[in-house]
Amino acid sequence: MKLLSLNFFYVVAGIFLALVAAHIAMDRSHPRRWGSALFWGLLALVFLIGKSVPAVWVGYLLLVLVGLAATNQVIGKAEAGPSLAERTASALKLGNRLFIPALLIPATAVIGTFLLGKIHIGGVWLMDSANVTVSSVGLGAVVAALAGWRLTRAPARTPVVEGGRLLQTIGWAIILPQFLAALGGIFAKAGVGPVVADVVARALPTQYAFIAVLAYCVGMTLFTVCMGNAFAAFPVITLGIGLPFIVQQHGGNPAIMAAIGMLCGYCGTLLTPMAANFNVVPALLLELKDKNAVIKAQVPIALTILAANVALMYFCVYRF
Amino acid sequence: MIKLVGILIVAVGFGLRFNTLLVVMAAGIGTGLVAGLSFNEIMALFGQYFVENRFVTLVALLVLPVVGLLERYGLRERAEMLVHRARAATAGRVLLLYTAIRQISISLGVNIGGQAAMVRPLVAPMAEAAAKLQTESANPAGRAELPEATVQDIRAHAAAAENVGNFFGEDTVFAVSAVYLIKGVLDAAGQKVGVWSLSLWGIPTALVAFAAMAWRARALDRRIRHGAAERRRGAP
């Protein structure tokens, strides 16, 4: 038995989404009142009861969400909010105490990661030890919200209203990472990976040791760009290119190959809109006009690291 | 080869700027159909994987109420005030320091960052405030606002500082999930590797990543300085 299981936090998130949906539905001046309320309300259902309904229902519900997003039903309201002068006055009044709730999130995450996963009385555990990192950050967010609410003496609905405003700034893109994870699952189920590895292996002269390294590193990067996730690319490219050519054909060190290979995948993550939670969601969150601005800022960094990785792997993998 | 239809749909769909959710859904359906699944089976798979991956969205959702609340009460403005006391601060230095903190803490297994929890409310406003200081010290007469293009440039690099720190600290020192994934895949293929040697070989790339971020941070500072100097020349 776990007191703060992942499911507890899914319910908290579901309640938040449901309240945001209700708030939009009651707002007569919202430009897409019913479409937006329906979108967030249905997403709330996935978080509240997603596990207890047949998966195929969730699938059709996702079709509705996609339809709403594709027809521009999910947009935010250009709300004025408090003026800069009001916020500055509040910042002066509350002073550095404002940082306390914000820093409670990482602080709780640290304590949670190291301690809370180990607390139990008999068979009753405080936290699910398998998901202790996610649960700790979730707990941190809840604790911080309570502390912030107390500190600011805000009305009870303010966290929902302001959180809802941020949620609508991000919009439907907030479920994109989760959606892409589902696509990754379908790709794996359909056996897309081995086909890619086979194509690459046949197209390149891997009898040269350097070409093997180059194919593996660049293959990890490019396949991560396609999949949006280095973890999804790693087994495919490592089993398809890395092990047969670098380790078996040229006698390379598998630990060096794999460690650096995974980091080549992360270079791909820096370059792709498919890695939505790292590149697309922040662009919306930071209100950037160019949705690819984060990727553009990361291109020189990613290419530098990739080049260094190829050199590093070539000089080390066959020597140690 | 036909199984790659999903990747093709994604590439074409992104290229033509269709709604991204629509493209992903189409890629999944296309891939499922060529792999011989029925439409209902594909919907069930989408539903199953979507529910299983709720944790991906969970943290981003849960931090929104507190971040929104604190922003309303002046958190971003307070973060800017804090930077005003640090004379040596520049936008690039603020971001580079954040990357360093992120790399070190995550290598110890502690995930303290996040685009919603840290970058929007704290890191980006601090970097913007530092940039204002830089341009003011170059131009003591005016307390001009930063030009919009500079603000966008700084924010994009703040997101990058978070990503670089997050990705390239992860595999070092204290092994985390990525290292176990690597070990799992290699073990299953009959290659025995130690967790510690995997962590060790992540360190050189972590240093390269920090150096690359330092290079971009300095370039950002240079653009901010040049922008300020040009505006000064432009004004009488």
Image (spheres, coloured by chain):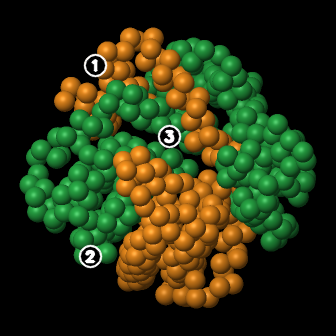
Quadrant of image for the C terminus of chain A: bottom left
| Chain B, hue in figure | orange
State how far apart marks 1 and 3 are (Cα).
24 Å
Residue under the point 70% across and 44% down = B62
User: Is the residue at mark 3 from the same chain as the one at mark 2?
Assistant: yes
Asked if the residues shown at circle 3 and circle 2 are in contact, with their CB atoms under 8 angstroms apart, the answer is no
| Chain A, hue in figure | green
State how far apart marks 3 and 2 are (Cα).
39 Å
Dot 3 falls on a residue whose secondary structure is: helix
Is B218 displayed left or right of A170 in the figure?
left
Q: Give the residue type that dot 2 points to.
A: Arg
Dot 1 falls on a residue whose secondary structure is: helix
Q: Give the residue type that dot 1 points to.
A: Val
The residue where tag 2 is placed is A319
User: Is residue B90 shown above or below A62?
Assistant: below
Quadrant for residue B132, please give it.
Answer: bottom right
**3 or 2: mark nearer the eye:** 2
Asked if the residues shown at circle 1 and circle 2 are in contact, with their CB atoms under 8 angstroms apart, the answer is no
Residue under the point 27% across and 54% down = A242
Quadrant for residue A113, please give it.
Answer: bottom right
**Mark 1 chain:** B
